[in-house]
Amino acid sequence: MLQTFLRRAAPVAAKQPAHTRSLWYQVGFNQDPEKIVKTINRTMQDDGVMTQLDQRFAHEKKWQRRIRKNAESEIRDLNKRMASIVNYCLKKQKRGGHL
């Protein structure tokens, strides 16, 4: 009975997504945003995110490509919004205002 349970449970455990983590960086006063972006990119490289994405592109179907392109455009839009928020905060810090 235990063996059948383990056989049934094994595929379910394999379907769970890989461990992901959220990136949180505190932007210090007068800190260069380019350094933060480099740090984020370096962290993604260390996690292997980019190599996983490169491997997926090699054998994807048209419908998979369409989904990926849509997700990438959403990420670009979010990055633009985050950049505008960071720029707003940095400008406000330079003016001496409180956030």
Image: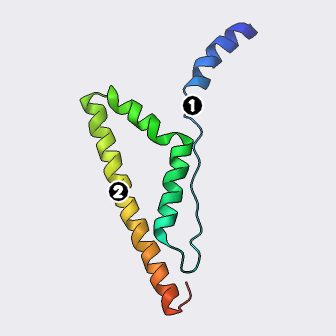
Q: Which numbered tag is attached to residue 16?
A: 1
Q: In the image, what residue occupies the spot 34% across and 59% down? A: 77
The quadrant where residue 57 appears: top left
In the image, residue 96 sits, relative to residue 74, either above or below, namely below
In the shown orientation, is residue 82 left or right of residue 97?
left
Q: In the image, what residue occupies the spot 57% across and 31% down? A: 16
Q: Which numbered tag is attached to residue 30?
A: none
Q: In the image, what residue occupies the spot 52% across and 51% down? A: 42
In the shown orientation, is residue 94 left or right of residue 5?
left
- Point out residue 61 in the picture as x, y percentages from the top left corner: 28, 27
In the image, residue 78 sits, relative to residue 71, either above or below, namely below
In the image, residue 45 sits, relative to residue 59, either above or below, namely below
Does label 1 or label 2 sit earlier along the sequence? 1
In the shown orientation, is residue 61 left or right of residue 37?
left
Q: CA distance from mark 1 to mark 2?
A: 26 Å
- Point out residue 30 in the picture as x, y percentages from the top left corner: 54, 80
Q: In the image, what residue occupies the spot 53% across and 92% down? A: 96
Residue receiving disc 2: 76
Relative to the observer, which residue lies in front, 77 or 48? 48
Q: Residues within 10 Å of mark 2 (few under 14, many from 20)?
A: few
Relative to the observer, which residue lies in front, 5 or 11? 11
Work out which quarter of the rendered image holds the C terminus and state it: bottom right
Q: Residue furthest right?
A: 2
In the image, residue 19 sits, relative to residue 15, either above or below, namely below
Three-letter code for the amino acid on which mark 2 is drawn: Arg
